[in-house]
Amino acid sequence: MPNMKKMIEQRKHKRFHVQNGTYAMLKYKPALMGQITNMSKDGLAIRYIDGDQRLSDSKALDIFMTESSFYIEKLQVKTISDREVTDTHSSDSNKVRQRGVQFEGLHPIQLFQLYYLLQNYTKNRRSGKDRRQLDDALYSGAKKRKIIERRQSRLYA
């Protein structure tokens, strides 16, 4: 039996699946881009087609969406993993790889743009109308009073 190591989850934040049409520019000359599969506040995963030359560890990337004018430029990243992914749709000469990167040293504007992307263009997030409201049947009577009192005590503490 091969030596199997159990993977330990090291992520601090939950990853969310992004909408189709969200891409990252991994390399500028010659251009190489990949589709972002999931992301969090700390990093993201990108699937790309590896050509003849192996992609070096890029220090920056851009994020853009084809369906909107959303664009984040020159995010500083550190490559955490880069592995081949089995894909039945690709030929032998073009291998599909998945790269995991971690964000580093982002400017406040870039952080704001990332949070905006997470809030508005990811799946498995509850929208404002789907979140529980105090008027829901679950929050009636004593439970509703406790929640209101707890919120007020935080405000005046």
Image (cartoon, rainbow, N blue to C red):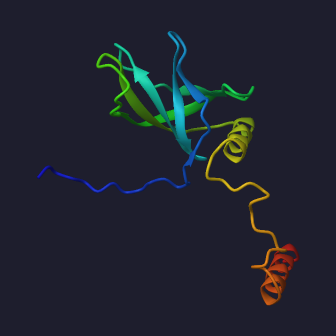
Quadrant (top left, top right, bottom left, bottom right) of the C terminus? bottom right
Residue 63 in the figure: left or right of residue 155: left
Q: Nearer the viewer, residue 115 or 156?
A: 115
Q: Nearer the viewer, residue 24 or 77?
A: 24
Q: Is residue 17 above or below residue 126?
A: above
Q: Is residue 100 above or below residue 128?
A: above
Q: Horizontal and vertical percent for residue 146?
A: 80, 85
Q: Residue at x 86, y 73 (%)?
A: 155
Q: Horizontal and vertical percent for residue 67?
A: 70, 27
Residue 141 falls in image quadrant = bottom right
In the rendered image, is residue 122 in sight?
Answer: yes
Residue 156 in the figure: left or right of residue 132: right
Residue 135 falls in image quadrant = bottom right
Residue 5 falls in image quadrant = bottom left
Residue 95 in the figure: left or right of residue 11: left
In the rendered image, is residue 56 in sight?
Answer: no
Q: Residue at x 45, y 26 (%)?
A: 48
